[in-house]
Image (tube, coloured by chain):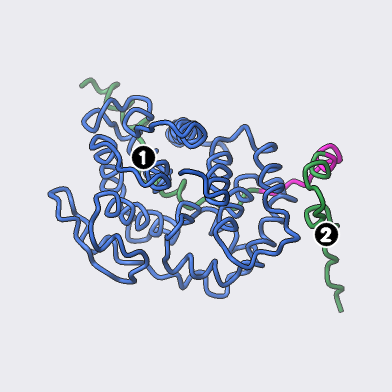
Amino acid sequence: MSSTEFLTDELTEVQGVDVEAALDPVEADGSYRDSRECAALALTSGSTSLLLSPPTPRPKKG
Amino acid sequence: MEQSGTSTRLADAVQGLTSELVSALRSGGPFGLAGSVPGAGGPEAADKLTLAAVRVVGADAVLPNVLRHTPPEPDDLAVFSGAVHAYPPPADASPTSTWSHWAMNRTLLRLRGTPDAARPGTPGHNGSSGHSFGHSSGHDTEPRAAWLDGASWQSLTHQLAVLAPLAVPGGDCAVTRVARGRPADVARGFVRAVRRRDWLQAAGAGRWLALLDGVPDTLGLENGLAFVAQMGSADPRVLLQVEAARLMRTGAPV
């Protein structure tokens, strides 16, 4: 195996650390729905309304 | 943050394997793990990328067999076993990695028909595979779920979604017992995930909810899952969780 091949293998081989990272992902950043998606949800949600309810108010400070 | 080349290749391999699993669950047709991962012609040909992808997908890599109660082909079992043994959790592994590995070991024992594995949720049992490629003594000792004690409903939902492969019929363990005790929190987490457009978390939480009793009727889980599948359709990992949930909810011939 040439040094180039060796280096390529080293750089491309999946390491245990990659697997561990994939098994313990951080929570994805949230991005909130736009009106188009709200409309789609309204069409599919039938008689339920929980998913469409407004966010719960934040507690007031002080 | 930019992904490294190897983690991108791993992510691609995971996506490919998951796509095959989704197709198998939807069609009800035969599924062969060894033939589902690019580059894996058989157990000997399974390269490290293949084994890593199977390890990341976890026990779900043989989900069609688990849900249909059908034994996998010997080559599939060899690939699955190879992933279990190639990537054991390191000493400083995260709880999700440890539990994922435990779930794979338990599934492996079940698929081999080991008597101990037929009794789900036997805490701390130390069954041996009885096969030459065992190495499982001690590996199937159930880990602790203490890290979930007192977890906020947001954190609980995230952790459960990551550990969605544990959500299978009859899959009793410490994590499932925690989930069973907090159905309203998981339902709340499902709604939060939908509102944050975190389709993967929503799908994983929805899969758990499909198994739990005491889920609020007002949640509209079925419609919610359909919405998640629609919005997250670009990601086969989302579709895998939704399909698993659907099959478990409908009791379809799985």
Closer to us: mark 1 or mark 2?
Answer: 2
Q: Please tell me which residue lies in front, A59 or B78.
A: B78
* Residue drawn at (35%, 58%) of the image: B102
Residue B132: in magenta span: no
Give how far across and how far down residue A28 sits, in percent: 63, 48
Q: Quadrant of residue B83?
A: top left
Instruction: Assess disc 2: are there few (<14), some (14-19) or many (≥20) residues with their C-alpha within 10 Å of its C-alpha.
Output: few
Residue placed furthest toward the bottom: A62
Q: Is residue B218 above or below residue B70?
A: below
Question: Which residue type carries mark 2?
Answer: Pro
Q: What whole-number distance in Å separates the C-alpha atoms at marks 1 and 2?
A: 40 Å
Instruction: Assess disc 1: are there few (<14), some (14-19) or many (≥20) residues with their C-alpha within 10 Å of its C-alpha.
Output: many
Chain holding disc 1: B
Question: Which residue type carries mark 1?
Answer: Ala
Which mark is on residue B19?
A: none
Q: Which chain is blue?
A: B
Q: Which residue is mark 2?
A: A55
Q: Are the residues under marks 1 and 2 on the same chain?
A: no
Q: How many marks?
A: 2
Q: Which residue is mark 1?
A: B52
Q: Please tell me which residue lies in front, B212 or B10.
A: B212
* Residue drawn at (80%, 54%) of the image: A48
Chain A drawn colour: green
Please give left or right for residue B163 compared with residue A9 in the image: right
Give how far across and how far down residue B94 sits, in percent: 43, 59
| Residue numbers of the magenta segment | A29-39
* Residue drawn at (71%, 49%) of the image: B194
Residue A36: in magenta span: yes
